[in-house]
Amino acid sequence: MGSFELEPRYSTSQIPGKCLKCLGEQELNNCLKELLKNEQDDEDVKQRFEMLVNFLQSPESKKLRDESEKLLSEGKHVTLTVKSDNTTGKLTYELATD
């Protein structure tokens, strides 16, 4: 697994939304639960977990969260793609709108 996506949503009175940080933390918890309940080593889940930890701790996460909130307030659909270079392990982030 070399990438995954997070799709933040803007909160309205009818629909609760989640920012990138909240989504990242939710996915981190999901990965942790999956790792704890599975007896087998799942390398994809481990890699996703590590990528999420690195994303949440990175200085870029705050910038991306602010930018995504701005785009969401303008009524745009936002997707953040987190990619890992398999050789270096370096993460890259791509914020896209539809």
Image (tube, helix red, strand yellow):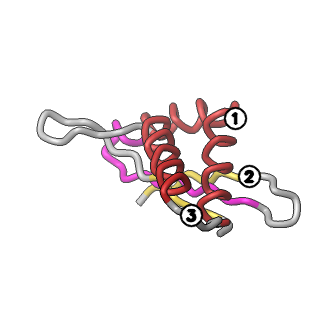
Residue position for label 2: 91
Quadrant in the picture for the N terminus: bottom right
Residue 69 at x, y = what percent?
43, 35
User: Relative to 18, is 32 on the left or the right?
Assistant: right
Residue sitting at x 87%, y 58%: 88
What element does badge 2 sit on? Answer: strand
Was residue 82 drawn as part of the magenta stretch in this picture?
yes
Q: Does 16 sit above or below residue 31?
A: above
How would you rate the neighbour count of disc 1 (Cα within 10 Å): few for under 14, some for 14-19, many for 20 or more?
A: few
For marks 2 and 3, give the CA distance.
Answer: 28 Å
The local secondary structure at tag 1 comes to: loop
Answer with mark 1 or mark 2, whichever residue precedes in sequence.
1
The kind of residue tagged 2 is Leu
**Among the two numbered marks 2 and 3 on one chain, the one whose residue lies closer to the N terminus:** 3
Residue 83: x %, y % from top left: 67, 59
User: Pointer 2: residues within 10 angstroms few (<14), some, or many (20+)?
Assistant: some
Q: Amino acid at mark 3?
A: Glu
**Does label 3 or label 1 sit earlier along the sequence?**
3
Residue that carries the numbered disc 1 in the rendered image: 58
- Which segment is the magenta one? 71-84
Examine the rendered structure and indicate whether residue 53 appears above or below residue 90. above
User: Label 2 near label 1: C-beta < 8 Å?
Assistant: yes
Q: Is residue 15 left or right of residue 55?
A: left
